[in-house]
Amino acid sequence: MRTRYLLLAPLALLAAPAAAQPDPAARVDSIFAAWNMAESPGCAVGVSRNGRTVLSRAYGSANLEHGIPNTPSTVFEAGSVSKQFTAAAIVRLAQQGKLSLDDDVRRYVPEVPDYGTPITLRHLLNHTSGLRDWGSVVQLAGWPRGTRIHTHAHALDVISRQRSLNFTPGTEYSYSNSGYNLLAIVVDRVSGMSFAEFSRRELFEPLGMTRTEWRDDFTRVVKDRATAYALDDGAWHLRMPFENVHGNGGLLTTVEDLLRWNQALDSGAVAGLGLETRGVLSNGRQIDYALGLVVGEFRGLRQVSHGGATAGYRAYLARYPDTGVSVALLCNAANANPGLATRTAALFMADRLGPEGGPAPVPPVAVEPAELERRPGLYRSRRTGEPLRLVMADGKLRTGGGTELVPVGPATFRFGSSPTRVEFVEATPVQVRIVYPDGDTVMYEPAAAADTSATHLATYTGEYRSDEAEATYTVAVVNGGLVLRMRPDMAIRLSPAYADAFSGPGGSIVRFIRGADGRVQAFTIGTDRVRELRFDRTGG
C-alpha cells in the first residue's frame, strides 16, 4: 500500500479523546481507499478551517511509468475551477478603471459577430451570453478538444464564424467555455500584458500562490506536475490536455495554493472582487452561477464552489462560509468523483450539517387510471428540439427511459424522486411544461412520429456543409437506418426521434429542414452547448 502524505494540525484534531472525536484522517483514508495504491493515479485533498490547514493528504501515483507518488505539493490541472481566477482578473481590471463588467465584449474583441444585441462581459462571466461553446463546435467538426493543438486564435476564429446564438443574451443560462476564453483575451488586450503575466502579478504572487500558473504553453516543463490518465478496457491510458487555450480551464496548481485562494476570498485579502454575485436573467430570475463560482447549498449550509474536468484531470474547490471550512480536491484520474471532496468536507462540519438527500419529495396523490392514460405521447422541446416520449407501463406514467412521473396534482407530476415538476398545460393541443428546481421552465409541444420507411429515409441522403464548423457530413442509409459520415472514418448512427428528427450520441439531436417543395434543404445539429448548427445540402 502506498505511503500516505499527511499534514494535520495536532491541536485542532487530536485534543479530544478518540472516542469522542474520531480521527478525521483515518476516515478520509477510507473515502480515498480506492485510490490508495501505486498502480493507479489518484488525488490530493486539503481541508482548512478559518484559514488554518487541518488536513493535507495525497493518494495514488502522479506518474505510473516512473512510479512517482502524488503528494499535497503535486501540481495538477484544475479544469473549470480555473474560471474564478479569470473572473477575478476581469474584476481587477474593473477596479483599476480599465473596463466595466457591463461593457459590450465587441469593444475589446471586435471579431465577435454583431448579433444585434450587446453581449456584455457580465454575460460572459455568468454564462448567459448565448454564445455557442467553441469546443463543442470543433467536436462536431471531427476534432474534439485534445485531438488538435488549439490556441486562443483557434477559439476566436471559431467564435467569429458563428452566425447565430443559442439564445438572446441575458435570457437563459447555458454553460459555454467560449465566454471565458474571450475574457482571457480581453485581459490580454486591456492590460497590455499576457493574461498569464497579469494573473501572476495581480493574483498569484500577492497571495503566495507560488505553485500556480496558467497552462498557456502545454510543452513547458512544470516541476512536480502529475500526468493525467483515463481508464479504458481495464487499463490506464494517458489523457493529457494537449492545447494552449486557457482561462476557461488550464490552471496548474496545488491543493495548498487553492486553500490559500479560498482563505483570501474569505478574509477579504482580495477585497471587493464580488465573485459571489449571482447572475440575474432578463426576466428577473436569479441563477446559481456567479462570477466563475456556483453559489448554492450543501446539506443546509451555504456552499460556494466549482468543479473542473480537463482531459484526465478532475478538480473541486468549495467553501462553506458559515463554518469556515474549505476543501480542495485535485485528481489525475478521469473517473475520480467530485463527491470525494464534499464527503471529506462533511467530516469537518458534521455537527452543522442537515440530513442527506434534501427535503422530502412532495407526496403523491391518487389519480384515476383514465386520467393517466390520456397523458402518453411524443413531444419535443421548443428550446432545443429534444424529444420527450411518455408511455404507460405497469399502470404508471413513465418517460421512454423508464422514469416514473409521480402524480402530485390533477395535472402535475414530479420527475421520479426529484423536485423537478412536469405539468400538462390544457391547451389545444396539450403541451408539457417542465419546471426545474432553480425555476427554469421549458415547454414541450406535440411531435409527429418519425417515418422510417426506406423511401422516406432516402430523402435525407446527400452531402451537407457548414462554414460555421468548417465541416462536411454525408448522410447515408445503412442497414435500414440513417448514418452521418465524415472523412476519414467517422460514422454516427442516428435513431428516429420524431418527424424529420433523429437522436445522436450524447443527447444530440439532428433535425432536417424542408423547403416549400418538401425537399430536404439542410439539417441542424443540437448538443448540450450548441443549438441548431446548420449544415446546408450541397450539389443543388
Image (cartoon, rainbow, N blue to C red):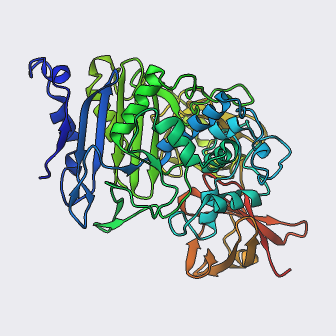
Q: Nearer the viewer, residue 304 or 221?
A: 221
Q: Nearer the viewer, residue 432 or 464?
A: 464
State the residue at coordinates (32%, 69%). Answer: 233
Percent x, y of residue 148: 55, 69
Percent x, y of residue 199: 53, 41
Quadrant the C terminus occupies: bottom right
In this picture, is 158 found above or below 1? below
In this picture, is 479 found above or below 89? below
Percent x, y of residue 191: 66, 42
Q: Nearer the viewer, residue 242 or 89?
A: 89
Instruction: Count all numbered tags in the image, as a single digit.
Output: 0
Q: Is residue 361 among what the camera can see? A: no
Q: With 25 as the anchor, is 504 left or right in this view?
A: right
Q: Is residue 190 among what the camera can see? A: yes
Quarter of the image holding residue 24? top left
State the residue at coordinates (62%, 77%). Answer: 485
Percent x, y of residue 296: 49, 27
State the residue at coordinates (60%, 49%). Answer: 194
Q: With 393 as the anchor, is 175 left or right in this view?
A: right
Q: Nearer the viewer, residue 255 or 433?
A: 255
In this picture, is 254 found above or below 366? below
Q: With 240 as the anchor, is 121 left or right in this view?
A: right
State the residue at coordinates (19%, 43%). Answer: 5
